[in-house]
Amino acid sequence: GESVGLHLPTLSVQEGDNSIINCAYSNSASDYFIWYKQESGKGPQFIIDIRSNMDKRQGQRVTVLLNKTVKHLSLQIAATQPGDSAVYFCAESRGGSYIPTFGRGTSLIVHP
Amino acid sequence: GAVVSQHPSRVICKSGTSVKIECRSLDFQATTMFWYRQFPKQSLMLMATSNEGSKATYEQGVEKDKFLINHASLTLSTLTVTSAHPEDSSFYICSASRQNTEAFFGQGTRLTVV
């Protein structure tokens, strides 16, 4: 069925390194994508979003890349810090519904 | 970003009792609110979508008589888990959105049924 999925369940990096978290989606009708960060015992926190008419968007230390040809989304975190340790979810929605469908999640572990 | 408050953050209840969870949008009027359920080390699964003043739309497999949702105002939605059982123990998360904007999430409620 249609789904949003992640390639890596766990990613371990050293403090200061750049992190890349990947996500694949299967529904070509998806037109809005969001990355969320979820710390243990808390709700998801919005990080950055991108619409399907763009292929790159940058925020503070984060960049989202969208490749519609292969239905792939990535989140790049520059100079990763211990406070970035969390589970990261990509989510997709379509047709202006803004109802996010969440992918599996990747646990990012940052070692000091 | 907008603030969504969820209460309580943790609740323990006895099997067979009902539990109510509140979700409030503190600084905006939420035309739509969503309820999610999350098991440990798993993703968020959408349970239902509610619009103010109308009945909630439940996802397939979610029992509407088990999970009662009320969205009586533009700033408050409640989820009541009726006759809770241990298998209902989970992390429940709400989110709220204004018209045509992204959803903002509450901090979640950890429900433990004993």
Image (tube, grey):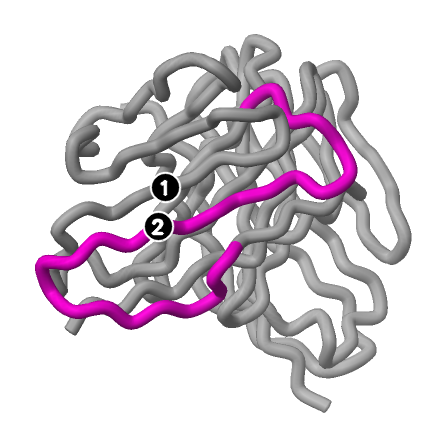
Element type at mark 2? strand
In magenta stretch: residue B60: no
Q: Please name the amino acid that badge 1 sits on.
A: Leu
Q: Residue at x 64, y 26 (%)?
A: B30
Q: Position of residue B79 (x, y in %)?
A: 36, 41
Q: Residue at x 83, y 35 (%)?
A: A57
Q: Position of residue A1 (x, y in %)?
A: 27, 24
Q: Seen in the image, is A76 located left or right of residue A102?
A: right
Same chain assignment for discs 1 and 2: yes
The chain containing the residue under callout 1 comes to B
Q: Seen in the image, is A96 located left or right of residue B38?
A: right
Q: Please name the amino acid that badge 2 sits on.
A: Lys
Magenta highlight range: B7-32
**What is the residue that sits farthest to the bottom in this orientation?**
A112
**What is the residue that sits farthest to the right in this orientation?**
A60
Q: Residue at x 67, y 29 (%)?
A: B102
